[in-house]
Image (cartoon, rainbow, N blue to C red):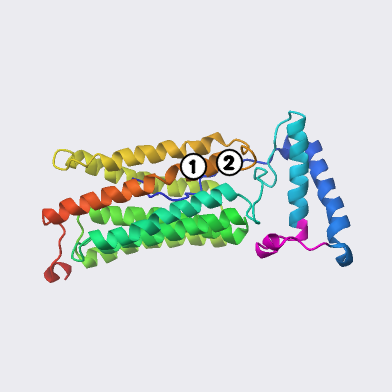
């Protein structure tokens, strides 16, 4: 199953202002007026709420938010289309968080990984060769969803990169440990070599996006390709093991469920009640899939250990 992570597949829709120039001018005029009346002169500037100051909202940021919602409210009253602003739908912020639903669902996804950590430590014997890799998966999964929550709290270039790069790392790590598991790669030298093969293109990918061009389409294609290869490994594993292992169907079904959840991204509708959009619902849909995946990993570990597959002795690691 493709590693469950915020893959950065959000559709980067061009702002509808290009199709509605009068709305662009309405928004710009509103922001300029708010800036001159509330932000330009220090003595006229009212302090923002504490939650906004803690989340680094500036006066001009607040003007953009207020104008965006003023225009959106008027559009809803007149039964007109709701438009995007700066490439984003108009969400209602909460405690300074720009997209509170996506923040909540990201944290819940991360919490699923946190809950899995003690289960993995208890259930996986220390001499089973996949133990460190499954524990690493829990750590990387937690980190990935943490940065997703940070990014959806405040969308800055720095938080966007941390979100995308963490997701890309999680996807590549998923392929890394999957190949080790499927091929039963117990030799540490082989694991190290395979790790370098995965690490080098990941670093080149991050370097290109950081220093050359932050290309959303390329990033989406790259992560989707690695995720697709990951899926193919588990599908092949399911086919070759379905007679021997009663749980062998689970990776394929998990992959299908995840793919179905990702279809929510295609919808890209204006947020319901200013809170729930397709992207936040995609994050919500992945929450129950994470414990399902850990359940499969533990079932597989139990079968492997019971049949003495991949149970290490000192000599096996030389």
* Residue at figure coordinates x 52%, y 36% from the top left: 266
- Mark 2 or mark 1, earlier in chain: 2
Apparent side of residue 76 relative to residue 189 in the rendered image (left or right): right
Point out the image quarter for the C terminus: bottom left
Point out the image quarter for the N terminus: top left
Q: Does the magenta stretch include residue 220?
A: no
Apparent side of residue 147 relative to residue 87 in the rendered image (left or right): left
Q: Across the whole image, how many numbered discs are drawn on residues?
A: 2
Residue at the disc numbered 1: 282
Apparent side of residue 90 relative to residue 226 in the rendered image (left or right): right
Residue 110 at least partly seen: yes
Question: Which residues make up the magenta segment?
Answer: 46-60
Residue at the disc numbered 2: 276
* Residue at figure coordinates x 65%, y 42% from the top left: 89
Q: Which of marks 2 and 1 is in front?
A: 2
Q: Residues within 10 Å of mark 1 (few under 14, many from 20)?
A: many
Q: Which is nearer the eye, 146 or 216?
A: 146
State the image coordinates of residue 220 (x, y, percent, origin top left). 49, 47
As helix, strand or loop, the secondary structure at mark 2 comes to loop
* Residue at figure coordinates x 37%, y 57% from the top left: 115
* Residue 273 figure quarter: top right
């Amino acid at each position: 199953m493709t590693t469950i992570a915020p893959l950065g597949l959000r559709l980067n829709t061009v702002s509808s202002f290009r199709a509605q120039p009068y709305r662009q001018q309405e928004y710009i005029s509103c922001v300029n007026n708010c800036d001159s009346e509330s932000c330009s002169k220090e003595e006229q500037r009212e302090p923002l709420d504490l939650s906004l100051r803690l989340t680094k909202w500036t006066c001009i940021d607040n003007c953009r938010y207020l104008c965006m919602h003023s225009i959106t409210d008027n559009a809803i009253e007149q039964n007109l289309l709701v438009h995007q602003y700066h490439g984003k739908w108009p969400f209602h912020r909460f405690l300074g968080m720009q997209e509170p639903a996506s923040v909540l669902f990201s944290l819940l996804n991360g919490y699923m990984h946190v809950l899995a950590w003690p289960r993995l430590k208890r259930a996986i014997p220390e001499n089973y060769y996949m133990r460190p890799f499954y524990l690493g998966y829990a750590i990387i999964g937690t980190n990935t969803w943490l940065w997703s929550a940070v990014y959806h709290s405040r969308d800055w270039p720095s938080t966007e990169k941390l979100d995308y790069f963490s997701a890309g790392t999680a996807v590549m790590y998923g392929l890394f440990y999957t190949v080790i598991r499927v091929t039963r790669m117990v030799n540490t030298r082989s694991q190290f070599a395979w790790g370098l093969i995965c690490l080098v293109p990941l670093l080149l990918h991050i370097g290109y996006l950081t220093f050359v061009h932050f290309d959303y389409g390329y990033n989406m294609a790259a992560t989707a390709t690695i995720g697709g290869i990951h899926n193919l490994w588990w599908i092949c594993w399911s086919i070759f093991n379905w007679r021997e292992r009663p749980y062998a169907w689970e990776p394929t079904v998990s992959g299908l469920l995840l793919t179905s959840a990702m279809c929510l991204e295609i919808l890209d509708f204006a947020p319901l009640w200013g809170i729930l959009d397709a992207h936040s619902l995609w994050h919500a849909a992945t929450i129950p899939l994470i414990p399902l995946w850990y359940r499969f990993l533990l079932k597989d570990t139990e079968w492997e250990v019971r049949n003495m597959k991949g149970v290490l002795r000192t000599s096996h690691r030389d």
